[in-house]
Image (cartoon, rainbow, N blue to C red):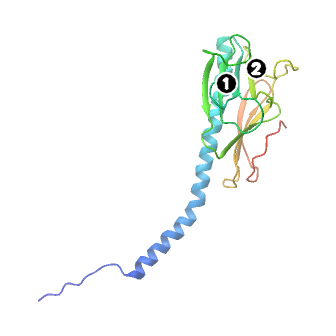
Amino acid sequence: MKRHNLQGITLIEVLVGITIVAILTSIATPSFTALLNVNRLATQANDILGALTISRSEAIRLNKRVVFCRSDDGTSCAAGGGNWQGWLVFADNNGNDMPDAGEILRTGTIASSSIVVQGSPGISVQNNRIQTGADGFARSAPGSSNALLQARLSVCIATSSPEQNTREIRITAGGHAVIVPVNNSGECPSPSNS
């Protein structure tokens, strides 16, 4: 009678395999987390930059003042400081500085509760808005000097993974906006205008 040799995996081979998988996972997890955070920051910053671009182009196209503002409910502009929950863009057809029926052009939300969005002092903390005139230029709030706006919006995750944990949307004089990665050492401070 012929004997069949049973072949299989020994307990030691299983333990070595599990150890190798654990080591590789511990090496890969931090870089994967950093990659996820970079993608979250880029997506949210690009979403807001797109809304600012739409605001500017619609102001020129409609030949009216268009407002980009912080919104917690998607139907009205939110007042006061603090972290943004969302935003909206509206054409101020009747000049009352409020989004009325038929005036809202776009809305958006902040995709993750770990993302902090804040405006610099150039974006009036009282009304959290950027107003673009029919000429396509973003200006300071009405009733002020009506100077060209220079401000920053900060999109941040309070982590040191990645090191550049903030994307600043810098609005230069006239309304042109660019995204700049910033290292805030794992913190999410309010952006400054400088």
> At label 1, which amino acid type do we have?
Ser
Q: Position of residue 20 (x, y in %)?
A: 49, 72
Q: Quadrant of the image for the C terminus?
A: top right
Between residues 153 and 98, which one lies in front from this camera angle?
98
Left or right of 16? Residue 63 is right
Q: Position of residue 44 (x, y in %)?
A: 63, 38
Residue with the mark numbered 2: 137
Q: Secondary structure at mark 1?
A: loop
Farthest residue in the right direction?
145
Residue 15 position by quadrant = bottom left
Q: Residue at x 19, y 84 (%)?
A: 4
Structural crowding at the residue carrying mark 2, measured as other residues with C-alpha within 10 Å and reported as few (<14), some (14–19) or many (≥20): some
Up the image or down, 18 lies above or below 29; here it is below
Q: Residue at x 46, y 77 (%)?
A: 16
Up the image or down, 107 lies above or below 157; here it is above
Farthest residue in the left direction?
1
> At label 2, which amino acid type do we have?
Phe
Structural crowding at the residue carrying mark 1, measured as other residues with C-alpha within 10 Å and reported as few (<14), some (14–19) or many (≥20): some
Q: Position of residue 21 (x, y in %)?
A: 48, 69
Q: Quadrant of the image for the N terminus?
A: bottom left
Left or right of 150? Residue 43 is left
Residue 138 position by quadrant = top right
Q: Position of residue 31 (x, y in %)?
A: 59, 58
Inter-mark Cα distance, 2 to 1: 23 Å
Residue 69 position by quadrant = top right
Q: Which of the two discs, 2 and 1, labels the residue nearer the N terminus?
A: 1
Q: Secondary structure at mark 2?
A: loop
Name the mark on residue 76. 1
Name the mark on residue 91. none
Left or right of 94? Residue 150 is right
Up the image or down, 34 lies above or below 27; here it is above
